[in-house]
Amino acid sequence: MSIVTVQLGQCGNQVGQELFDVLSQDWQDGQGQGSRVQREAHSSCSRERFFNQEPSGPPSARAVLIDMEPKVICQTMATAAKRGRWQYGDGSHFCQKQGCGNNWANGFCVHGPRYEEAVGDVVRRQVERCDRLAGFLSMMSVAGGTGSGMGTYITQCLRDAYPHAFLLNQVTWPYGTGEVIVQNYNSVLTLSHLYQSSDAILVHENDTVHKICAQLMNIKHISFKDMNEVIAHQLGSVLQPVSPSPGATELGTNPIGDLMSSLVCHPEYKLLSIKNIPQMSHANQAYSIFTWAGLLKHLRQMLIANAKMEEGIDWQVRAPSLGLRAAPKASHNTALGFNTSLANLLILRGKDVHSADAGGFSSPALYSSWLPAESALSIWRSAQPFNRYEKSATLVSNSQALLRPLDAMVGRAWNMFASRAYVHQYTKFGLSEEDFLDSFTALEQVLSSYSHL
């Protein structure tokens, strides 16, 4: 089944281009791995999922590019064409010559309704090229105007136009120190509205990705391209095909639908985080050897201690005993820094993958008491290595991992709103103060729900 990717704003378009680069490179590099039948099945499934086969020339991405300014879209399309492995199709983009000025209300209340029909036509053309539509992957930042404001409006339009299609939003959170003065307003408005229309929201934090680039990739002068490559690697490790069981020939058919059924069991819990191990520069991969036992031990502790990467894990944090786990939230897990999960998806790729023992992730102590551990944990495996890593493990988690950054974001936005700072910049485009209050209320409910897992 095919995924239509909707790239929104500067961030969404740049991350999307890196994602298609990773995907195309992966199935081309993977031709030397496994049996010929396995290689061909993996490559064919990946191409059908993400690319259209063109009569001549390289395949085209199943993607729609949207921005209110043409510069980034032109650069993105030119970069893809220059590399020659794949391209963006003709008529797959929509842009204008007037941006949203980092104003969520301008994107949501003005540009979104004004260009709804034109954007809908571009999306429909991509959907009609799919034999079987698995769903939409929308990629956007929550801090700016086009990606967040217009992106939120387009997400609502996709939900209305394709009510039975799965809708996954990949969102990039801004640096905590600030990129845009009103980024917390934009973020609160985006997340509260996406919660109503999206099936799940997969979050990447710029602060975390920056640390991965600096400490794991050993990049001295970190650019947004470096960070986008890390995000693309993590996304690709989730979305590439997997085999459902040892010896099975059928590859996972609907990655977004399978993701939802594994992780999103209640509409109040839609925030997903992602952890990936190992991550390093390609130059260091040739000199590194990993075992499944070591990788899974580190990844499990990253989950428990809510560590963003394998360096700096707090090994003192332990899962509470089942007796404590059954008690009210009180202070047990909070005091220990323990990260309670509602559901986890573990994706293992590479050599000897079916020998990997993932039993440590099935402990009931890791999970809320709502679901039995055997229902809360899903494991996908593929013997095909991903992105040149002989072995790799990815954990997509619906847990308390995002509780602290979300709480900080809402708090900063509320402090600004209490003094009505910059509110007039939003109300002049049609957003009311009541809309702000509704958004704060919605996210306070999300925070309360996750804090009581």
Image: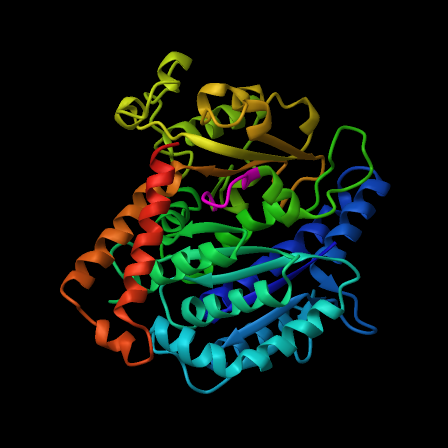
Residue 179 seen in the figure: no
Q: Is residue 241 magenta?
A: no
- Residue 399: image quadrant is top left
Please identify the quarter of the rendering in which residue 123 is found: bottom right
Image quadrant in which the N terminus is located: bottom right
Residue drawn at (51%, 19%), measured in percent from left and top?
363
Left or right: 224, with 21 as reference point:
left
User: How is the rendered protein coloured?
Assistant: rainbow
Say which of 240 and 361 sits in front.
361
- For this orientation, the residue located farthest to the right is 37
Query: Is 442 located above or below residue 263 in the figure?
Result: below
Query: Could you say where residue 4 lies in the image, as x and y percent from the top left?
Result: 65, 62
Q: Say which residue appears at 62% left-offset and 68% top-offset.
A: 161
Spot occupied by residue 100 in the image (x, y as percentages of width and height): 38, 78
Residue 287 rendering spot, x and y as whole percentages? 55, 35
The single residue placed furthest to the bottom in the displayed view is 97
Instruction: Give, as a single range, the part of the protein colored magenta.
Output: 263-270
**Where is residue 293 shown, x and y percent of the image?**
56, 21
Name the quadrant of the C terminus. top left
Q: Nearer the viewer, residue 402 or 371?
A: 371
316 or 121, nearer to the observer: 121
Q: Looking at the image, which is closer to me, 40 or 302?
A: 302
Instruction: Give the left or right position of residue 246, taking residue 188 as reference.
Output: right
Q: Is residue 269 magenta?
A: yes
Q: In this rendering, is residue 311 above or below 432? A: above
Residue extending farthest to the left is 419
Residue in view at x 53 percent, y 24 percent: 361
